Amino acid sequence: MENNRFKNWKRKTESEIQQRVFTALNKNINFDQENILGLPASYLDQEVFSHDSNLLKDTPYLTSLVHNPNHIGCHTLGDSESYFSGTHNIEKELIEICAVDFLKANPNSCDGYVASGGTEANIQAIWMYRNYFRHELNASLNEICILCSEDSHYSMNKGSNLLNIDIFQFGVDNETRLGTEKSINKAIVEAKENGKKYFIVVLNMMTTMYGSVDELEPVLTELNNQNCTFKIHIDGAYGGFYYPFTNPENELNFSNPNINSVTLDAHKMCQAPYGTGIFLAKKGLINYTGTSATYVKGNDFTLIGSRSGANAIAVWMILAKHGPYRWIEKTFILQKRANWLCEELDELGISYYRHPFSNIVTMKTNEAISQLSQRFGLVPDNHDNPSWYKIVVMDHVTIEKLELFTTELELAIVNLEEPVLN
């Protein structure tokens, strides 16, 4: 990894983290001490949620939940509600860390916000590019489409439905999980035959089912060969907190001039509370989703509107606690566990897919795996008629747990191979 890569992301001590969060909360509105009459907000209901200072004094995250800061809007743009400016600044720091230190953006070159999850962030991107094409190129809705692989997350179909634009998905090879030149070409030709001129392209930085990573160049080549107008979004909802560290030389980041926005999902590999995604876009783009909210300072450029500042604080705290090099070490350990699992599956003759920089191992189904799926919580690609089952090597998925699975799998294989005696 190149020197001086991490410009903003530094490891902090527990006391430094507490001081930073409590200082930010103290800069926010104090509903108990200030005569603020017009806000439709307050602290969490103290009849239900304890405000005991002794309980909260060493717990900045719980305190932020109780204080209930509203992070409505996109704070990287400037104007925001001053009542919560202290914790808004923590979110701005988090956005800069993710853009610059995860995704190689130039300093202060990206906007973004903490969304409710990867689904919202992906729809935010599609909405943004749809509006960009309409406002800048006078495109009609029926001239705009989404282009992505068949392994892409279902949020692309949600975005298509909500925003009333068509979606075209290119097929992938069953073994490599990559789009082929032929399948990409076919999807683009079909789109153009249906009158599409403007392409919102979504590429995957580790798919949810397979951990597969889309290749940029084949898609770019076909788009350029067919003179398409396009914008590219990266869905890193699963891989955004993982893949940049297992494959730091990857091209799916803001250093590539063709990539304009990225989704991250902190409630997966970052282990933040559920309901925590991150949307990032190069400057000048998120403005296309601006909606005037006259009672809120600054336009609201986000899909979700009001949102909990505690989620942004949680992600900032997690990254500050680990720092970049402990994070690299964390992903290194998970890679080693995934390597171990693959070696065991090879010995058992089990067919599987695994991207070399991923911690997801997806096995082709057979009777033995199917028998163990419920016991070990294996997730199928399709609950009605599964072809694949996946294992996700998270922090809690130790080699001891993996060994128990492979031992049971070997026993199931042997039992199935033994002849039944009449």
Image: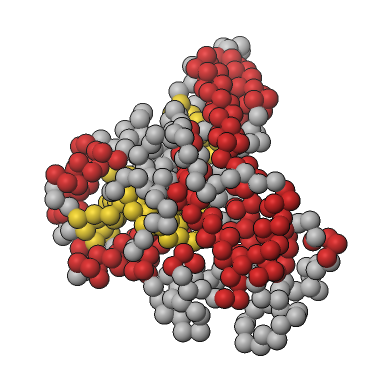
Residue at figure coordinates x 19%, y 47% from the top left: 223
**Residue at (36%, 28%) from the top-left corner?**
175
Q: Position of residue 20 (x, y in %)?
A: 67, 58
Q: Position of residue 24 (x, y in %)?
A: 65, 64
Residue at 45 percent of width and 51 percent of height: 99
Work out whether residue 145 or residue 229 is closer to the camera in this orientation and state it: 229
Relative vertical location of residue 305 with respect to residue 220 in this rendering, above or below: below
The image quarter in which residue 255 lies: top left
Residue 252 picture quarter: top left
Q: Residue furthest front?
A: 4
Q: How many labels does the image show?
A: 0
Please name the residue shown 80% across and 68% down the image: 51
Question: Whole-percent x and y of residue 28?
Answer: 65, 72
Q: Picture coordinates of residue 225 (x, y %)?
A: 14, 44
Residue 322, compared with residue 190, is above or below; it is above
Q: Which of 66 and 33 is in front in this view?
A: 33
- Report if residue 404 is visible in the image: yes
Front one among 281 and 156: 281
How has the structure been colored for display?
A: secondary structure
Left or right of residue 316, residue 202 in this image? left
